[in-house]
């Protein structure tokens, strides 16, 4: 090996047909130069850490740069003897710098890709809507720049525009995103934690009375949203299961909804018997072109829940306590049991729950379990509910 000098490097020739040539110093083994056919040259250092061979570039060969680069190479070689890999440290530093500079708008698609793979389609779609639309105000920031006041301000703005429930759900979606950021080194803290709920009454506590359900029915109207609300009152199903109802999911002759497993929260197929009143509502919907969904516009099911709920609330009695659309499901289940229209295990089957009575039946779930009992209970409930509405309307 030659002793590297600037003159030696200037005379170093790259063999014909080769892209580059390397030469190493005889006084500091591992310190060398890499010269390209273009004439450009860079300082390099080559070393071993354990059994792993590493090579690191030290920058371009410039007049007078050799002493400083030789000293730097000596430090790297000394650290390598102690088991320290400066190249790996440099790679890690670059990766960390990249993570620090990554903006939320660039990271959200990566997080949503994970949601698409791990969440139910409807849940992933909701997460996408909250992060892409409601939290667009944060997209130009890097995660470490977002503060708790930023999130509080955003939650307050969402509440003002779309309602308290939407604000709470948007905060939860943002919190999940920041948890993912922390796990991957994009953030050190979650600024969405510890922020109070905006919904006045937790949904787990609210049961609408029968007169309140009748008031909701009357105020709901006869548009898509109103029909969905009335069907929720008649069936006790989840909002998105009815709002996203497809014509292929309704067996008209059998008078029942047949939900596939990818449309239910617990991933289990579910049959929903339809009372005459529910069948009448579905029969009143108008099919638009080749669209197969009963409600809403575009490819998906119904959207615009928050604004529709706000309009409904304005038509309700002023003294009615705050409520959430999911409260209908709990309320109907409660009244079915209180009126003895259905025993507890039948109510669980109507709700598509797999706990309690339902979970223990031969250890196997049956989508038609207690179907006759469910049909009888919902038929009695539909008749009772319509009679109640007629009394309230007079």
Image (cartoon, helix red, strand yellow):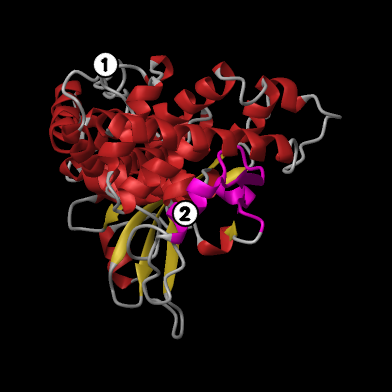
**Quadrant location of residue 297?**
bottom left
Q: Compared to 85, does 263 lie above or below?
A: below
275 in the magenta segment? yes
Mark 1 is surrounded, within 10 Å at the Cα level, by few (under 14), some (14 to 19) or many (20 or more) other residues, namely few
First of labels 1, 2 by sequence position: 1
Q: Is residue 52 left or right of residue 47?
A: right
- Report the residue at 29% width, 43% height from top: 305
Residue 60 place in picture, x, y as percent: 26, 58
State which mark lies toward you, 1 or 2. 2
- Of the 4 image quadrants, the one containing the C terminus is top left
Indicate which disc residue 377 carries. Answer: none
Q: Nearer the viewer, residue 186 or 262?
A: 262
Mark 2 is surrounded, within 10 Å at the Cα level, by few (under 14), some (14 to 19) or many (20 or more) other residues, namely few
Residue 50 place in picture, x, y as percent: 61, 36
Range shown magenta: 254-283
- Residue 211 visible? The answer is yes
Indicate which disc residue 196 carries. Answer: 1
């Amino acid at each position: 090996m030659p002793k590297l000098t600037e003159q030696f490097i200037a005379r170093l020739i790259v063999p014909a047909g080769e892209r580059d040539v390397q030469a190493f110093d005889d006084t500091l083994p591992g310190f060398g130069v890499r010269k390209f056919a273009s004439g450009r040259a860079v300082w390099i250092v080559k070393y071993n850490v354990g059994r792993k061979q590493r090579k690191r570039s030290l920058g371009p060969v410039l007049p007078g740069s050799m002493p400083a680069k030789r000293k730097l190479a000596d430090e790297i070689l000394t650290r390598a003897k102690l088991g320290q890999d400066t190249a790996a440290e440099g790679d890690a530093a670059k990766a960390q710098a990249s993570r620090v500079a990554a903006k939320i708008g660039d990271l959200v698609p990566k997080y949503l890709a994970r949601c698409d793979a791990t969440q139910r389609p409807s849940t992933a779609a909701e997460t996408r809507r909250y992060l892409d639309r409601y939290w667009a105000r944060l997209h130009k920031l890097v995660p470490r720049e977002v503060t708790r006041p930023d999130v509080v301000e955003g939650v307050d703005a969402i509440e003002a525009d779309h309602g308290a429930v939407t604000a709470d759900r948007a905060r939860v979606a943002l919190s999940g995103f920041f948890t993912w950021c922390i796990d991957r080194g994009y953030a050190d803290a979650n600024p969405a934690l510890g922020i109070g709920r905006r919904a006045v009454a937790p949904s787990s506590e609210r049961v609408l009375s029968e007169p309140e359900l009748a008031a909701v029915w009357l105020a709901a109207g006869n548009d898509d949203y109103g029909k969905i609300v009335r069907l929720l009152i008649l069936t006790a199903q989840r909002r998105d299961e009815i709002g996203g109802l497809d014509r292929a999911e309704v067996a008209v002759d059998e008078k029942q909804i047949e939900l596939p497993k990818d449309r239910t929260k617990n991933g289990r197929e579910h049959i929903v018997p339809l009372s005459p009143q529910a069948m009448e509502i579905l029969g009143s919907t108008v099919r638009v072109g080749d669209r197969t969904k009963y409600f809403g516009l575009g490819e998906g099911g119904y959207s615009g829940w928050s604004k529709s709920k706000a309009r409904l609330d304005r038509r309700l009695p002023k003294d009615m306590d705050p409520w959430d659309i999911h409260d209908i499901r709990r309320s109907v289940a409660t009244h079915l049991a209180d009126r003895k229209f259905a025993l507890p295990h039948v109510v669980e089957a109507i709700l598509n729950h797999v706990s309690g009575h339902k979970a223990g039946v031969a250890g196997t779930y049956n989508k038609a379990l207690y179907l006759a009992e469910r049909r009888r209970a919902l038929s009695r409930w539909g008749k009772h509910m319509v009679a109640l509405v007629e009394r309230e309307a007079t």
